Amino acid sequence: MPNPSAPRQNGKQQAPETRKRNFDEVAQIFTKEEALAEADRCLNCKNARCQANCPVGVQIPAFIALLKDGKVGDAASKIMETSLLPAICGRVCPQEKHCEGNCILKDRFGSVNVGMLERYVADTARKEGLLKAPQTAAPTGKKVACIGSGPSSIAAAAELARAGHEVTVFEALHAFGGVLRYGIPSFRLPREVIDHEIETVKAMGVKFVTDVLVGATEKIGDLLKEFDAVYVGSGAGLPTMTGIPGENAVGVYSANEFLTRVNLMQAYKFPATDTPIQVGRRVAVLGGGNSAMDAARCAMRLGPDTVTIAYRRSAAEMPARAAEVEHAKEEGVQFEYLVTPKEIMADEKGRVSGLKCTRNELGAPDERGRRRPVEIPGSEFVMPVDTIIVAIGQKPNPIIAKTTPELKTTERGVLELDEAGKTSMPGVYAGGDIIRGGATVLLAMKDGIEAAGRINAYLKGDK
């Protein structure tokens, strides 16, 4: 019988004082005993709200039931019926907003720890050689190109391969994974996990090609001469900057550059690696999302005296995952809430010497219901910092849109889709950050899966 009132299992973590000086994974995998104890809390609901609120429809009660029966390989296969990235999703998906946030046990006993169970199943099945690539249908003779190798393109490629199409993924960089690799630190998502999940997709027959920047190396029109359809999942890799005076000072990074140097190029290992990175003694990170948390926690591991996150609103409005905020605090990251950067100050050599800010109070809600920050007159002050990382958002690189005028974009620079989810160019579909401007891994995967369904219909000649 299920035991929902048993204590929720959360697993073990590296101690903050230890982990703040390394890039090893913070959260440790469940032991078998912890996994079974947590699985035993699941009520196996017939009308499972957890599954209904999973954007990619993972069959949560079913995989947990298989785990309880000791069938780890079957549990992994059950997850992979709808999600080809179980070890990644188990680590980085915001379960608190989706499955766990809608668990029937949430208010009384605490939600089932779905994320850690998914991770346990995926990691254990991988280590024990139980993971199997999904079966693919008979070849259709159709060819599809997927632009980008992030979560949206990977999901689309896997679904298209399942349908029997010949799929090729084109990546602009020298390594696959997109934002999974350049944006998310290894202490949250180890590189070997990314590598293995991509290998699973390769085992389905999907081809992966590096060093192809679509829009420059190849244009979409050229791809359509070789492929029957194209999926654009190239993400949002162009940083948004503040536009305040002094932003060109030495010591200012965009979060995109900083995280790419650290995560993709492994600059934290310099000089053993080719890419250097430098932070001063006092680091400020501007922003309040997950990228800001990742940047701050990476910066802390590079050895400064202080790392401070400066955010325009209050803690209650901060969009980052609560767990990531808590981890940052445990590691010594400081928080300055309700402040607006006004100017980056520099010394006579052009290096950052301070950040001039004003204090805010919360005013009326904006169009998304979040209370607007309003500057308090006379509240100006200077934060003494020598490194600034700007993590206030990102947008799609305009190279595809500029070289493909047939593709319509919105005022925000994202690709425009019609009510049927199609771009303005026949045979071209899109999803993930290039249509959202910024989203979670899970929503990007959802877009890829749904677009694959539309591409299947298109290739069959359906209306």
Image: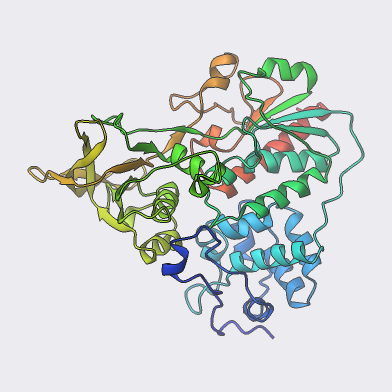
Residue 408 appears in the rendering: no
* Residue at point 64%, 66% (across, down): 48
Please identify the quadrant where the C terminus is shown: top right
**Is residue 4 found left or right of 136 in the rendered image?**
left
Question: Is 314 above or below relative to 351?
Answer: below
Q: Nearer the viewer, residue 107 or 233?
A: 233
Number of on-image labels: 0
Please identify the quadrant where the N terminus is shown: bottom right
Q: Residue furthest left?
A: 378
Q: Residue furthest right?
A: 138
Q: Nearer the viewer, residue 121 or 21?
A: 21
Question: Is 118 above or below relative to 416?
Answer: below
Residue 123, located in which quarter of the rendered image?
bottom right
Residue 10, located in which quarter of the rendered image?
bottom right
* Residue at point 71%, 23% (across, down): 427
* Residue at point 54%, 67% (across, down): 27
Question: Is 119 above or below relative to 155?
Answer: below
The colour mode here is rainbow
Where is residue 330 shown, x and y percent of the image? 38, 66
* Residue at point 68%, 79% (across, down): 36
Where is residue 445 shown, x and y percent of the image? 63, 45
Residue 414 appears in the rendering: yes
Q: Nearer the viewer, residue 350 or 126?
A: 350
Where is residue 70 shown, x and y percent of the image? 78, 76
Question: Is 328 above or below relative to 224?
Answer: below
Where is residue 116 shown, x and y percent of the image? 60, 67
